[in-house]
Image: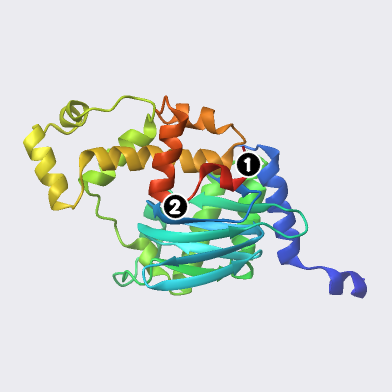
């Protein structure tokens, strides 16, 4: 019994369960990011609070004046919107990079904010490295709930995880985000990336004239065509990580009829050839 206890590693056990969950296809508020080649991407937009649990491989992150190096068994906390340069390195034994991404949805954030109820949170750093051990109980409950299809229990477990993160000093998760016009446009495009989005579509959705829309975006240092293009390419990056679809299929799913044009724009945006991820 003593030998068993000595050999039992709860972190390793949880990582094994997370890997099983990632490959099981179970429904839930999470996604599985995989890669089969070492690669880097620049200026990857993080548009919402989320946890990235590193299951296999290593990850290097640079952004917002910070530099983090993470290994399996660590969590990248992304507390608010930011742009990151990343390098993903597959595990040398299995040849697979695997990260479980858990968005912290508005309902979970609102519940945490209500329960926390303490002094006003401060923004703090947008990213941080967290040891899996620090959220062991909460994530164990979350995995158990997702495995059994209990999504309400899964969100309760994630609320408990957020409360734990706040107790560790990461109260920036609770700072209400300021949503720009560019953010709102990205949301619409990402919900339907194959649509041939035109200025009049956005104008009608927001009840703005074309001149007013251009002025509002200019105030945010954006141009409409760039916002639409970047939203499409963000969808493409997610598909390249979460599916094994051919690049031609990914290009079509985000509104590109020409594969060569898609590849050219993708490289311009991320400094990464879409084939370099190695999943296709």
Q: Viewer-nearest of labels 1 and 2?
A: 2
Residue plotted at (48% across, 63% down): 77
Q: Quadrant of residue 16?
A: bottom right
**For marks 1 and 2 on the same chain, the one whose residue lies earlier in the sequence:** 2
Q: Position of residue 275 (x, y in %)?
A: 57, 42
Drawn side of residue 34 relative to residue 51, left or right: right
Comparing 124 with 258, the one in front is 258
Drawn side of residue 99 relative to residue 216, left or right: right
In this rendering, does residue 224 appear at all?
yes
Q: Which residue is mark 2?
A: 271
The answer to whether residue 40 is above or below residue 247 is below
Q: Residues within 10 Å of mark 1 (few under 14, many from 20)?
A: many
- Secondary structure under the numbered disc 2 in the rendered image: loop
Q: Position of residue 185 (x, y in %)?
A: 26, 39
Q: Quadrant of residue 224?
A: top left
Q: Which quadrant: the C terminus?
A: top right
Drawn side of residue 133 relative to residue 184, left or right: right
Q: Which residue is mark 1?
A: 279
Q: Residues within 10 Å of mark 2 (few under 14, many from 20)?
A: some
The answer to whether residue 113 is above or below residue 277 is below
Q: State yes or no: discs 1 and 2 in contact (Cβ < 8 Å).
A: no
Drawn side of residue 34 relative to residue 193, left or right: right
Comparing 257 with 97, the one in front is 257
Q: Position of residue 221 (x, y in %)?
A: 18, 52
């Amino acid at each position: 019994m003593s030998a068993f206890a000595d050999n039992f590693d709860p972190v390793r056990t949880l990582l094994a369960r997370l890997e099983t969950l990632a490959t099981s296809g179970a429904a839930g508020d999470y996604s599985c990011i995989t890669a089969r080649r070492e690669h880097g991407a620049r200026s990857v937009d993080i548009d919402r609070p989320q946890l990235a649990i590193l299951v296999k491989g290593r990850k290097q992150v640079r952004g917002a004046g910070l530099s983090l190096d993470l290994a399996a068994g660590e969590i990248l906390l992304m507390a608010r919107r930011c742009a990151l340069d990343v390098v993903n390195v597959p595990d040398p034994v299995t040849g697979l990079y695997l990260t479980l991404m858990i968005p912290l949805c508005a309902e979970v954030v609102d519940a945490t904010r209500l329960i926390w109820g303490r002094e006003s949170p401060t923004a703090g750093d947008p990213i941080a490295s967290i040891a899996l051990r620090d959220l062991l109980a909460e994530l164990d409950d979350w995995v158990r709930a997702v495995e059994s299809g209990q999504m309400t229990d899964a969100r309760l477990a994630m609320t408990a995880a957020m409360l734990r993160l706040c107790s560790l000093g990461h109260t920036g998760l609770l700072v209400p985000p300021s949503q720009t016009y560019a953010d709102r446009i990205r949301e619409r495009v990402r919900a339907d990336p194959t649509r041939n989005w035109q200025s009049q579509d956005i104008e009608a959705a927001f009840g703005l004239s074309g001149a007013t829309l251009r002025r509002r975006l200019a105030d945010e240092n954006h141009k409409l065509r760039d916002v639409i293009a970047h939203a499409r390419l963000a969808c493409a990056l997610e598909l390249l990580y979460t599916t094994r679809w051919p690049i031609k299929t990914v290009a079509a799913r985000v509104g590109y009829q020409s594969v060569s044009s898609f590849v050219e724009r993708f490289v311009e945006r991320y400094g990464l050839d879409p084939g370099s991820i190695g999943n296709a």
